[in-house]
Amino acid sequence: MTISDGRFHRRALISGLIIGVLAVGGARAQTFSRDQLLHLPLPAPEAANSLKWLLDGFDKNPGQVVAEVALRTVTWGDIADSIRAQPRVATAIPAMQLYQGAVLELLERAALARLGEKESLDKLPQIQRRMKQASDEVLANEMLHRSLAPNLTEQALRPIYDKAVAGKMAPDEVRVRIIMTQSEDAAFNLIARLHTQGDFEKIARENSKDGSAANGGDLG
C-alpha cells in the first residue's frame, strides 16, 4: 500500500501468501524469491532503465511467459497491461521496480484465483454475475476507446484546450512524495503519525519499503 501526499495509491502485495500457494496446480508452478525478481527477463538491456523501452519490448512479444502459477501463466502482455493501469505518477518509479511490482501483483492474483476455484467460488451465482460484469466492462471500455480515438486529434482538441485551459494559471510542476508499506495496517499507523508529527520526509526515510525512501519519498 502507498501513502501519498499526492493522489497515488497501490495495492498491498501479500508475497507470503503467494509463496504458500504457488505450488497449487502442478509441478510446473514456480516460486519467486526477492533475488529472482531482480533478474526477470528483459526485452532489451535498455529496458532496465527506461519504461518506454520496457513497454515497447513487452508489446512486441506479449506472449513471452515470465512465470507459471497454478496452471496460469504470467506474460509480458499481462505485465504491460498491469503497468499501464497504474496512475500516471507511477511512471516516476524506476522501470525495473514497476516491473517487479507488477509481477508480484499478478502472481498474487493468480494464486488467489486458483484458491477461489478450489473453493468453487467461481460456481456461485453472484460471482458469475460479477465476472460477466467485469468482462462486459472491458469490452465496453475498449469499444469506447476505439470509437473516440479517431476524434482525438490536434485539430479537434485545440478549441477545447483554448477554451478550458489556455491562459489560465496552473503550476509548472507538481512534486509527489510517497510512502510504500507492506500492509494496510502499517499504512494507517503511518498516517496517524503524519497527523501528529507531520514530518513526511523523515517518516518516509525510516519506513518506506521502496526505492524512494532514500529521497524521503520524493518521486520528483
Image (cartoon, grey):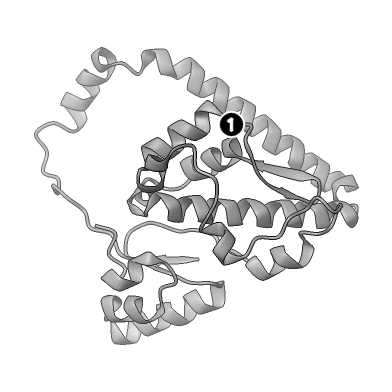
Residue displayed at 30% across by 64% down: 177
Task: Pick out the residue farthest to the front.
Answer: 45
Q: Label 1, on which residue?
A: 62
Where residue 186 appears, as percent x and y from the top left, is: 51, 78
Of residues 161 and 101, the one nearer the viewer is 101
Where residue 50 appears, as percent x and y from the top left, is: 35, 43
Is residue 42 in view? yes
Total numbered labels: 1
Crowding at dot 1, Cα within 10 Å, few <14 / some 14-19 / many 20+, comes out as some
Where residue 162 appears, as percent x and y from the top left, is: 16, 25
**Which amino acid, by three-letter code, is at mark 1?**
Pro
Of residues 6 and 55, the one nearer the viewer is 55
Residue displayed at 68% across by 30% down: 136
Mark 1 element type: loop
Residue 19 lies in quadrant: bottom right
Q: Is 194 left, or right, of 110 in this rendering?
A: left
Q: Is 95 left, or right, of 12 in this rendering?
A: left
Say above or below: 140 vs 177: above
Residue 217 lies in quadrant: bottom left
Residue displayed at 51% across by 34% down: 58
Is residue 12 in view? no
Q: Where does the C terminus fall, quadrant-wise?
A: bottom left
Say above or below: 44 vs 127: above
Say above or below: 206 vs 42: below
Residue displayed at 44% across by 18% down: 148
Where residue 170 appears, as percent x and y from the top left, is: 14, 45
